[in-house]
Image (cartoon, rainbow, N blue to C red):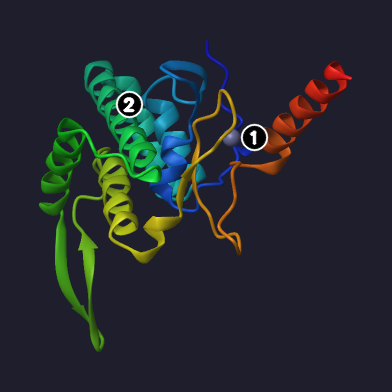
Amino acid sequence: MKEPQDWKQLKLVGGQPCLDFVNTVDRDGDQYLQDWFRDAADVIGWAQYVELVSSAQAKEWLRQVQQQPAQSAKFFNQAIQLREALYRIFSAFAVKRSQAAEDLQLLNTLLSEMQQHLRFVAIASSFTWEWTEANQLEFILWQIARSTTDLLTSSDCDRLRECAGVGCGWVFLDFSRNRSRRWCDMEDCGNRAKANRHYDRKRKT
Ligand SMILES: [Zn+2]
């Protein structure tokens, strides 16, 4: 029996759902150090934690994934593939490297699927997008895809950074005044880097 995740321990530093989605794993190059996603139930738990879905909807999906292991494994695989593609897209964009065509292709496939579940509707004196079939598990991934394109087409996209911490790989938006933020979180990676520098200095003297 696996332990339920204590989501409150996972910091949300990305500032956007698509960035926090990528930040569910700590990386050292190609290696995963800590991964919050062990199965589909964890992806659902995370979506509820970041308030992409209601607790009632999450509960219903958790019941579904238990009953349908094949469908649940497929969804999990899709979520991990999306997370990997987005990590590569954000990480490359942060240092102005070009994007891999297959990563953009994966995102585009998901976006065209997403588009089939959006309707443009009139509300009061304006218009909005409205989700249809928000009760499908893929709704989580559609929202991540939407959050990604919203971010990358916004003026904030220039603020995208990857944490300089070793064994981190988290992505975030740098809103510091002189745009010099290097760490996902000063308490974690920032202090660890400082402590290392301090240690190096001491060793040299
Ligand atoms: Zn970090």
Name the secondary structure under disc 1. helix
Q: Position of residue 158 (x, y in %)?
A: 40, 57
Numbered label attached to residue 80: 2
x 56%, y 23%: residue: 167
Sequence-wise, the earlier of marks 2 and 1 is: 1
x 64%, y 34%: residue: 9
Q: Position of residue 138 (x, y in %)?
A: 25, 39
Q: CA distance from mark 2 to mark 1?
A: 21 Å
The residue carrying mark 1 is 9
Q: What residue occupies the far front of the structure in this picture?
A: 205
Circle 2: residue type = Ile
Numbered label attached to residue 79: none
Name the secondary structure under disc 2. helix
**Displayed-image quarter of ligand 1:** top right
x 56%, y 27%: residue: 5
* Residue closer to the observer: 55 or 204: 204
Specify whether 176 is left or right of 192.
left
Q: Quadrant of residue 97?
A: top left
Q: Is residue 15 visible?
A: yes
